[in-house]
Amino acid sequence: MIDSGVPEQRLSVVGLASNQPLVPNDSPENRARNRRVTITIVAPKVDLTGAAEYSASGVAAGETVSGAAKP
C-alpha cells in the first residue's frame, strides 16, 4: 500500500491471532474462516491550518473492509 502512495501514518498493523475469532476454532472450515485480514481505511483529521493527522482509533471516520485470508 505504501508503494501505491498511501502515507505510512495511515497504516496500522495489529495481530490478533486466536484472541478474536469470528467463529469457534473447532473445525477446519471454522479455522479457515478465522484466517482473515481486516483493512481499515482511516480518514485524516484536518485542523484549521490544513495539517493532516492520522489516527487508527478513528474507525468511525473511515471504512472497514474484511476478507478471509487464503490458506
Image (cartoon, rainbow, N blue to C red):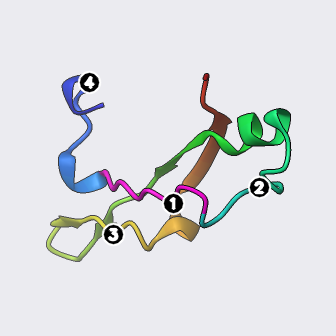
Measured as percent of width and height from the top left, residue 4 is found at 26, 24
Badge 3 density bin: few <14, some 14–19, many ≥20, Cα 10 Å: some
Tell me: residue 63, above or below residue 51. Answer: above
Give the residue type at disc 4: Ser
Quarter of the image containing the N terminus? top left
N-term-proximal mark, 1 vs 4: 4
Q: Is residue 6 left or right of residue 64?
A: left
Q: Nearer the viewer, mark 4 or mark 2?
A: 2
Residue placed at 28% from the left, 64% from the top? 54
CA distance for labels 1 and 4: 26 Å
User: Which residue type carries mark 1?
Assistant: Leu
Q: Secondary structure at mark 1?
A: loop
| Residue that badge 2 annotates | 22
Q: Earlier in the sequence, mark 4 or mark 3?
A: 4
Q: Amino acid at mark 3?
A: Ser
Q: Which mark is residue 16?
A: 1
Residue, disc 3? 55
Instruction: Report, in whole angstroms, how far the alpha carbon at label 2 lies from the one at label 1.
Output: 11 Å
Name the residue that disc number 4 marks: 4
